[in-house]
Image (cartoon, rainbow, N blue to C red):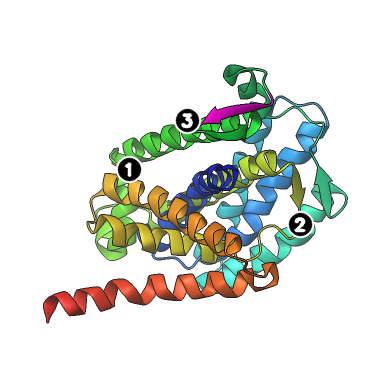
Amino acid sequence: MTLVVGAWTTGLILSLLAFGVFISFRVFHFPDITVDGSITLGASVTAVLLVAGTNPVAASAAAFGAGLAAGATTGILHTKFRINPLLSGILVMTALYSVNLHVMGKSNVPLLSAHTLASDVEGLVGHRATLDILGWQVASSDVAALLLVLVVVALVAGVLYAFFRTNLGTAMRATGQNPQMSQALGVNVGNMTIAGLALANGLVALSGALLAQYQGFADVQMGIGMVVWGLASVIIGEALVGMQQLGLVITGAVMGSVLFRLLVAGALRAGLDPNDLKLVTAAFVFAALILPELVRRRVRA
């Protein structure tokens, strides 16, 4: 049960990453590799602030702001300097590696004794070391973390849904779908792209902030391959909901992220060598990419 609770918690945390990837890849059709650096940026900023005694909410908000800056930088490189979208993200991601090292001052910052959001919520589930859930003993800290992340993801999903139904959000979606028409209607496509990438990476950095507080550390290598994880979550979610309605797509991103994490946890539980984790992750992504199309072809036949 501990493994399942942990998988659910991590999957929900990374659903914020999936939201960011959804905005960049699906809304703006922008192959944003900045994600690998911005999730670590969020974790590193949060870790340093928490160690310094900053309030966890303020530290998480600062991580979101740092992600906004990273995404905006990628957007500026693309729109103002006419750099290829993929290369823009690679440039910022590469630069963020050094930035993250400077922020943390070292490659790893532990948070075992720091005051975090999870420790605040832990008091709500009681002061016992373990809780009985369906006959299984689960650490109260794990239950607290799961409850916290459920609330945060629900709030973010609701705000994101409401935002994309506003005039600004609708303009962003229209810009991604048809930049020429949006420009003809008076929308500044460049500024809209910058704002969209900033929002996407802000959500990714917030995911990193929560992940660092849950895992109890921030590491400069923790962002490697995260863009693949986010894309896989979005694709799996789209296959699960089978529709392109905004609310369903956002819900699907959460479902895809949790399911993907449960699959990885199940593979580890079955005895997978941790050294093969990235290989298995790539295999899951490959399956997520081709299976929906194979199913559609079979249905048509």
Question: Nearer the N terminus, badge 2 or badge 1?
Answer: 1
Chief secondary structure of the magenta portion: strand
Q: Say which residue appears at 63% left-offset and 45% top-offset.
A: 211
Q: In the drawing, does residue 43 fall left or right of residue 267?
A: right
Question: Nearer the N terminus, badge 1 or badge 3?
Answer: 3
- Determine whether 123 is above or below 157 in the image: above
Q: Is residue 193 visible?
A: yes
Residue 54 is situated, as x and y percent measured from the top left of the image, at 75, 26
Q: Magenta segment, which residues?
A: 129-133
Q: Say which residue appears at 56% left-offset and 72% top-offset.
A: 280
Q: Residues within 10 Å of mark 1 (few under 14, many from 20)?
A: some
Q: Are marks 3 and 2 in contact (CB under 8 Å)?
A: no
The residue under label 1 is: 164
Q: Secondary structure at mark 1?
A: loop
The residue under label 2 is: 220
Question: Nearer the N terminus, badge 3 or badge 2?
Answer: 3
Give the amino acid type for the residue marked by disc 2 in the picture: Val
The C terminus: image quadrant:
bottom left
Q: Secondary structure at mark 2?
A: loop
Residue 175 is situated, as x and y percent measured from the top left of the image, at 32, 57
Q: In the drawing, does residue 163 fall left or right of residue 300?
A: right
Give the amino acid type for the residue marked by disc 1 in the picture: Phe
Marking on residue 151: 3
